[in-house]
Image: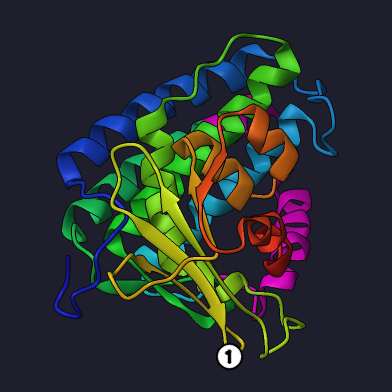
């Protein structure tokens, strides 16, 4: 919590995040060193080597933040993909070199995260927004887990994604999700979707007046749709790795609301 009375999707603390990041880092490092660097997961444009370079680029963003310098932030969310691609291409190197650099930066980030353990918004992010120290950690956790999964798919190796990890990643995405609202969404649009995620607070995503809110549900909310959804499915939807119909196969259910079909359009209002 913070002094603005913001209620996060779920509570956490530095001890939990440190443990989960360490575990994710170990798995990610082991995978990228073992897998063919030119292997490519089905449906992806990137190879294992390119994923490693991308994760390094994200770690370098944190290094710049730690030292009080500006990194290549996308002015609009539409530019994020372009930035990711150009930075990845500039960093391509043998995977062991990339892995060593990621490990070194992860150790530096660990100390920085120890100093930013609450919901004060102190870290500059894409789209001109600031995010909290906790979201800085959950974002890094998401990079390691999601791209660790990508690399495992390239190797056709088993990779279990922990629901708690994905709940923490979703927590962070709820903090900055408003910045990803598409610029062409009509200010006349008014949609409210309530979320029931296991082990999380009841939450809503509401789009109205040309803006988006991600916040704790209140008694005054009248949602168009109420969704019961696992954290992993919600996170993959927010990342736009899956669409609503795949999400249904992965445990999403519409369990109430005045206009339940409105939930099918929710994802289309946000940039990927």
Residue 105 in view in this figure:
no
Q: Which quadrant of the view contains residue 48?
A: top right
Magenta residues: mostly which secondary structure?
A: helix
Question: Is-magenta flag for residue 72?
Answer: yes
Q: Position of residue 262 (x, y in %)?
A: 66, 62
Quadrant of the frame with the C terminus:
bottom right
Which residue has dot 1 on it? 209
**Would you say 115 lies left or right of 104 here?**
left
For the residue pair 104 and 193, the one nearer the viewer reads as 193
- Measured as percent of width and height from the top left, residue 40 is found at 81, 25
Q: Quadrant of the N terminus?
A: bottom left
Q: Is residue 269 magenta?
A: no
State the scheme by which the image is colored. rainbow
Q: Position of residue 228 (x, y in %)?
A: 47, 42
- The region drawn magenta spans 71-99
Q: Is residue 146 left or right of residue 103?
A: right
User: Which residue appears at 66% of the width and 28% of the height?
Assistant: 249
Camera sees residue 53: yes
Residue pushed farthest front?
258
Residue 49 position (above or below residue 244): above
Point out residue 70 in the picture as x, y percentages from the top left corner.
49, 76
Asked if residue 269 is positioned above or below residue 63 in the image, the reply reads below
Q: Quadrant of residue 67?
A: bottom left
């Amino acid at each position: 919590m913070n002094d603005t009375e913001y209620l996060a999707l779920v509570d956490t603390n530095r001890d939990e995040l440190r443990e989960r990041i360490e575990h994710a880092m170990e798995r990610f490092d082991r995978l990228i060193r073992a897998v063919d660097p030119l292997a490519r997961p089905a449906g992806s444009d990137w190879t294992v080597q390119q994923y490693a370079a991308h994760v390094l680029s994200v770690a370098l963003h944190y290094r710049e933040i730690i030292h009080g310098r500006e990194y290549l932030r996308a002015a609009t969310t539409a530019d994020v993909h372009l930035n990711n691609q150009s930075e990845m291409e500039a960093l391509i190197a043998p995977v062991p070199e990339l892995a060593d650099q990621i490990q070194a930066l992860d150790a530096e980030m660990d100390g920085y995260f120890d100093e930013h353990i609450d919901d004060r918004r102190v870290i500059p992010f894409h789209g001109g927004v600031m995010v909290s120290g906790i979201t800085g950690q959950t974002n890094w956790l998401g990079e390691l887990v999601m791209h660790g999964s990508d690399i495992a798919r390239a190797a056709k190796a088993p990779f279990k994604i922990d629901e708690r990890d994905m709940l923490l990643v979703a927590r962070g995405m709820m903090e900055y999700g408003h910045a990803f609202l598409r610029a062409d969404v009509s200010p006349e649009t008014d949609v409210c979707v309530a979320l029931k995620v296991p082990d999380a607070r009841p939450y809503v995503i509401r789009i109205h007046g040309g803006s988006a809110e991600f916040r704790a549900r209140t008694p005054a909310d009248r949602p168009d749709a109420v969704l019961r959804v696992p954290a992993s499915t919600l996170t993959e939807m927010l990342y736009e790795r899956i669409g609503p119909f795949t999400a249904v196969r992965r445990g999403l259910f519409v369990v109430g609301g005045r206009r339940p079909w409105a939930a099918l359009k929710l994802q289309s209002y946000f940039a990927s």
